[in-house]
Image: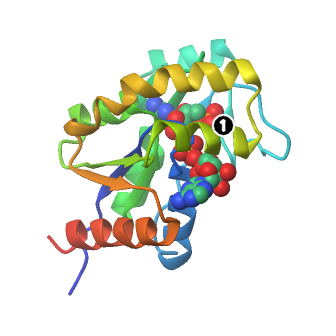
Amino acid sequence: MPRTPRLFVVSGPSGAGKGTLVSLVREQRPDLGLTVSATTRQPRPGEVDGVSYHFLTNEEFSARVERGEFLEWAHVHGNCYGTLKSEVDRNLADGHSVILEIDVQGALNVRKSYPDAVLVFIEPPSMEVLEERLRGRGTEDEQTVRLRMADAAGEMEKACEYDERVVNDDLHQAAAQLMRVLDSHEMN
Ligand code: ADP
Ligand code: 5GP
């Protein structure tokens, strides 16, 4: 049965496991389109411009906002992040579904311009586990971990506005559930 290319938006608190789950799904679904977001945050060691993100200055980011190039953008944990419309439209036109991995405010904004988007909330089994994972990842300093944990409480309250929810407790079960979400919406 032919699949309909869909826009999936995977979101949830930082450290919930969005990146890990989306990588697992991509291994099984190499046909999924790739989109690179833009951000004003500094690259982390190993991150490559144009691959991990388009790393922009505040001025470059604002100019793109002015030109209406973003499908959505948001201030997240002190920096700007945004999805370029061109990246999403190119993939959907080529018949590839797209998974955007973005913050909670941005995800809910996507619906305004793409009402058919499927919003998927990734939640940790508990806030304690979330903090352990965020610290365990070792990519944020103490101040950033605290900021992200403070933001997480408000983000969790938005889960009910999503089309689908996946609790990321056992990684492989959660990845299988996310695969089923994709399948069920592409077969519609
Ligand atoms: P996010 O993209 O939501 O910020 P990550 O995918 O970077 O989160 O995951 C945060 C950390 O938690 C990483 O170190 C990752 O390896 C770990 N992690 C993700 N999912 C699980 C899981 N189900 N069980 C245990 N650790 C996990
Ligand atoms: P990080 O700095 O860890 O790469 O990402 C921080 C947060 O920004 C994560 O919650 C991530 O999902 C979000 N993010 C990444 N790209 C985008 C984007 O294009 N738009 C929005 N709104 N958020 C994004």
The spot of residue 117 in percent (x, y) is 25, 48
> Does the residue tagged 1 have its C-beta within 8 Å of any atom of ligand 2?
no
Q: Quadrant of ligand 2?
A: top right
- Label 1 crowd (10 A; few <14 / some 14-19 / many >=20): many
The spot of residue 36 in percent (x, y) is 58, 46
Instruction: State which quarter of the image contains the C terminus.
Output: bottom left
Determine whether 91 is above or below 2 in the image. above
Determine whether 29 is above or below 120 in the image. below
Residue located at (64% from left, 12% from top): 59
Q: Residue under circle 1?
A: 54
In this picture, residue 102 sits left or right of residue 57: left
Q: Nearer the viewer, residue 86 or 50?
A: 50
Q: Secondary structure at mark 1?
A: strand
In this picture, residue 146 sits left or right of residue 102: right
In this picture, residue 146 sits left or right of residue 64: right
Look at the image and tell me whether residue 69 can be seen: no
Q: Quadrant of residue 113?
A: top left
The spot of residue 121 in percent (x, y) is 34, 46
The spot of residue 72 in percent (x, y) is 39, 30
Most distant residue in the right direction: 45
Amino acid type assigned to the residue bearing label 1 in the image: His
Residue located at (54% from left, 26% from top): 149
Q: Nearer the viewer, residue 141 or 5?
A: 141
